[in-house]
Amino acid sequence: MFIYLCKKIAIPGNVRLRCISWNKEEGFIACGGEDGLLKVLRLETQTDEAKIKGLAAPSNLSMNQTLEGHSGSVQVVTWNEQYHKLTTSDQNGLIIVWIIYKGAWYEEMINNRNKSVVRSMSWNADGQKICIVYEDGAVIVGSVDGNRIWGKDLKGTHLCHVAWSSDSKVLLFGMANGEIHIYDSNGNFIVKMKLSCLVNLTGTFRIAGIHWYHGTEGYVEPDCPCLAVCYENGRCQIMRDENDHNPVLIDTGMNVVCIQWNHCGSVLALAGSLKGTSPDKDVNVVQFYTPFGEHLRTLKVPGKQISALSWEGGGLKIALAVDSYIYFANIRPDYKWGYCSNTVVYAYTRPDRPEYCVVFWDTKNNEKYVKYVKSLISITTYGDFCVLATKADEDQPQYVLVLCNSIGTPLDPKYIDIGPLFVTMTRTHVIAASKEAFYIWQYRVAKKLTAMEINQVARTRKEGRERIYHIDDTPSGSGNGHLDYSKAVEGTRDPICAITASDKILLVGRESGTIHRYSLPNVGIIQKYTLNCRAQQLSLNCNSSRVAIIDLSGVLTFFDLDARVISSTGQQVIGEQLKLERKDVWDMKWAKDNPDLFAVMEKTRMYVFRNLDPEEPIQTSGYICNFEDLEIKSVLLDEILKNPERPNKDYIINFEIRSLRDSRALIEEVGIEESSQFIEDNPHPRLWRLLAEAALQKLDLQTAEQAFVRCKDYQGIKFVKRLGNLQSESMKQAEVAAYFSRFEEAERMYLDMDRRDLAIGLRIKLGDWFRVLQLLKTGSGDSDDALLEQAHNAIGDYFADRQKWLNAVQYYVQGRNQERLAECYYMLEDYQGLENLANSLPENNKLLPDIAHMFVRVGMCEQAVSAFLKCNRPKDAVDTCVHLNQWNKAVELAKNHNMKEIGSLLARYATHLLEKNKILDAIELYRKANYFFEAAKLMFKIADEEAKKRTKPLRVKKLYVLSALLMEQCHEQMQNAQRGKVKGSETASALAGLLEEDVLSSTNRFADNAWRGAEAYHFFILAQRQLYKGSVDAALKTALHLRDYEDIIPAVEIYSLLAVCACANRAFDTCSKAFVKLESLETLSQEQRQQYEDLALEIFTRHCPKNNKKTDLDDVLESGDGKLPVCVATGDPILEYRFWMCSVCKHCMKAKERSNYNFCPLCHCSA
């Protein structure tokens, strides 16, 4: 950063100032002094026009109000920015709160405790509370509306400072004896702060200031130190929080009176005085430090005694109270920024993110790309590329150099073990230096490689592209050098302070004033030069003959690297200090195309020098991006970073240097011939181009050609030749208008000459197809139809590129571009339109497979199959059906097109599903492919497994019903196949035959009677339902049927149920038989069998095992001769001749029960 004094305001009556505070939001400056002096000032705000011109902020006052109310010396002034209030206090303890009304400040509240003097006041971060501390130890916390929240008397202590934490949960109280006590927000003591900066010092030291940055603009690094405590003896500690036991320690070596952070916590300013040579000659200074204790700058301030300082809200100015004056200093911050190929790259912090936000702003197209980078150290740019230097990890001392392109895409990261304090970049190398060593990386960027290929290149990179050298080494340039970090960490007595490089040489500046010159790309030390200053910034001109040096105090000097001069000792030395010296310089840039041309920023002026002679200055505060072709491009970073998310193109300014301005004026006023003589005397390609363009305007083709030759513009020469071949004057003028991008004028001229074709040709070149369409519609011609089609398609492309598919469709329809039309329909999800398009295409059209694949991607099987068949690709159609699980369709297509592999494919897929234990998916697959027998077998297997698991009977019944239904479909399929055979049909399915054989040869119980499982569980559930309903007779009849199903339901469950039903029905003989059966079951354990015997004994000792209710039906049931049909609704045998039979499962139900059911009770098919 660079800082310089820019304005001084005297206080009337030479009243000494005691305090000053700058309102960060609205720019008011409050200053208090002796005899009750209180003033509110305000500097004029910049106009938009001045901002865009890059002028420095004005220093005139727009407000200067004296506030009456204090009688004693005003000692404390503090702003509440959120509520637009000013709080002041004087030596008599009087506190006044001021508010603004109609542009002037008035008293709002007054408080006078009369007992003691107010030493410090602090508003919390949201402006809701104020903490006031008195010298006698009294503390008051009040609200913004004047109410007291709490008060406390800290006995036996003298207070002098107070500060809030950012979350308002902690208060710090600074004591007169130098101690700092930590309290919570309710006034409860927590702990004393550990003061590491006073270690090894005895006695008490007064606190000069406590300032806690609240993170309102984000932090420069995660976990960044933000709490500064400083003592009058110059010892300072910067802490991450109030309990930080490892703070950053600074010994400023000065007598400090006041400290303050800037708006974003990146710079800490300490104001005070340094001991002079004689006792009464103290020098007022302001020292600037980073949060990590690095010294940035020292500003010397005139006057006897500095009493206070305050930062402006944007961090670009600082106000200093010295004696009876206010001094203002301008600050030029060291922004993290760069410029590469029309792109400004800049970084800023945000309160909502711990990382830096790096913006790549393409100034040509006004587009920006944002990257978030953790612990960013610097941004370096060259040509089309940019290098971001960052810290790799907070815990490890490792760093990363990330090579990016101009839109922020990382191309190649390099991990290094030295801190990249200084980074420079050339066309082929990136050089990073710490204080002791420098690292050189020969980067490669293949413009047309993909990211994957770039990684490949990075992996196969030859050894020696990365090298590291210690500053005290003397490399010869012959060896390759190695990446040996062990040397790099060794210390040096003369650290590196600046570096710069060109394609040929590398210059490294050291703190002693020595500059080392190395050759590139083979790093060998060529020369050592001695300067009489410590460089802070080095910059080489375009042919590496001169270097510009800016030192710590902003003095710019120049050194000729190749000049041979005789030294004072009479020896010949290489290198000479040039006579030119400029002060207060904060930026400079050499021209890219002229070694004697450079631009310098001094305070708020830009000077352009040619051969060390300055032109008249230009008022601007911009940072120089680029200097070539006699034009300087400058960027107003101060303005951009006020609203970094929306950079404005107006903040990029182009300045023409004098020779370009003079040449332009000369051409306009004197004429081409005289001007060409001036340009001959001051040759530059840009001036010749200017002359060529002026000559073209006047159709002076000879001069234009000569000028184009001098500026080596081959396209220009060709254009002049083409103009020479044209006969018509007006045609030449039209061509020149088009050359200078005055397209409307050129088109009008073509149309006036009745050359519509040329006007159309011009618009086609420009890609303005909308205008081409308009021109085509105004006339008619043979070639117009083809052009119309081309125009419609180009406009369709325009809309498609912007994803406006609906608009694109209209134009593609007119342009008959079926390929892009299909794409648009697909993007619009207009599948009907896509289907219509497929139907309208002729057979075997090359677009049909693409449309079919579009349908496949969205799962539209029928349309995809139709498209595949239309382009004669049945194999793809079958694959589609398989892919979309439409197996029945796949089988049908395979049959129709005599494809044999469908069966094997189906089997393979089913096996795959079964291996993954997806049995239900396999069943669905077989079912859809009409392989009903396989499906039924699998379903029956599931039902059996579920039955063994003893899950809910209803679930098991459903599974058995499903398997039986599949079996019924299988029978139906076989019958249809048989009928086909009978009719003599040749196309009888081989599949049906296979199925038939499979079924016929099947000997398992499932194939013989598919409904047995369903019947068993149906009667099992029915018996229990009847029992619970109290229909014990019906329950017993149903339970008796279960004796036939011991192979499906475990016998223990059947006979247990039968015993319960019989007992409930008092049919003790049946009950006795059930118990006999239970006791004889081999599956039971001895203990279970004993329990059954005990229960039987208990029942039959009370009841004789005889049935008292024997009916005729029992004889019929028990005889077993000629099975009667059973009613599936009631479980009764059907004796009537009329009954209902289910068409699906062929089970019966009594006619009188039929009216109670809409569905078959067994298979649940519609009755």
Image (tube, grey):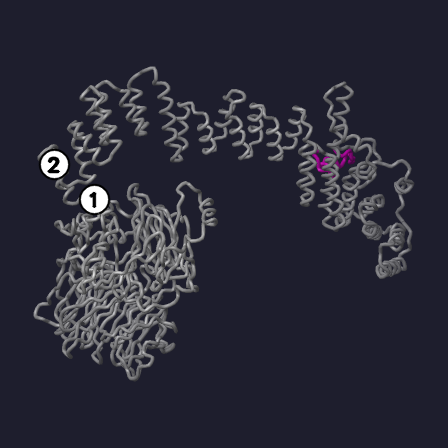
At x 51%, y 25%, the residue is 846
Residue type at mark 2?
Gln
Is residue 757 or residue 530 the one in the foreground? 530
Q: Which residues are magenta?
A: 1144-1166
Q: Quadrant of the N terminus?
A: bottom left
Is residue 657 or residue 485 the one in the foreground? 485
Quadrant of the image occupied by residue 888: top right
Q: Is residue 1149 magenta?
A: yes
Q: Position of residue 215 (x, y in %)?
A: 33, 62
Mark count: 2
Residue farthest toward the top in the current orientation of the protein: 782
- 1080 sits to left or right of 610: right
Residue 686, above or below 619: above
Q: Position of residue 390 (x, y in %)?
A: 38, 57
Residue 386, above or below 1099: above
Q: Is residue 628 magenta?
A: no
Q: Earlier in the sequence, mark 1 or mark 2?
A: 1
Residue type at mark 1?
Glu
Q: Which residue is mark 1?
A: 631
Point out which mark residue 677 bears. Answer: 2
- CB under 8 Å between callouts 1 and 2? no
Label 2, secondary structure: give it.
helix
Q: Position of residue 327 (x, y in %)?
A: 15, 65
Is residue 856 or residue 148 the one in the foreground? 856
Is residue 356 or residue 391 the one in the foreground? 391
Query: How many angstroms separate mark 1 from mark 2 (CA)?
Result: 22 Å
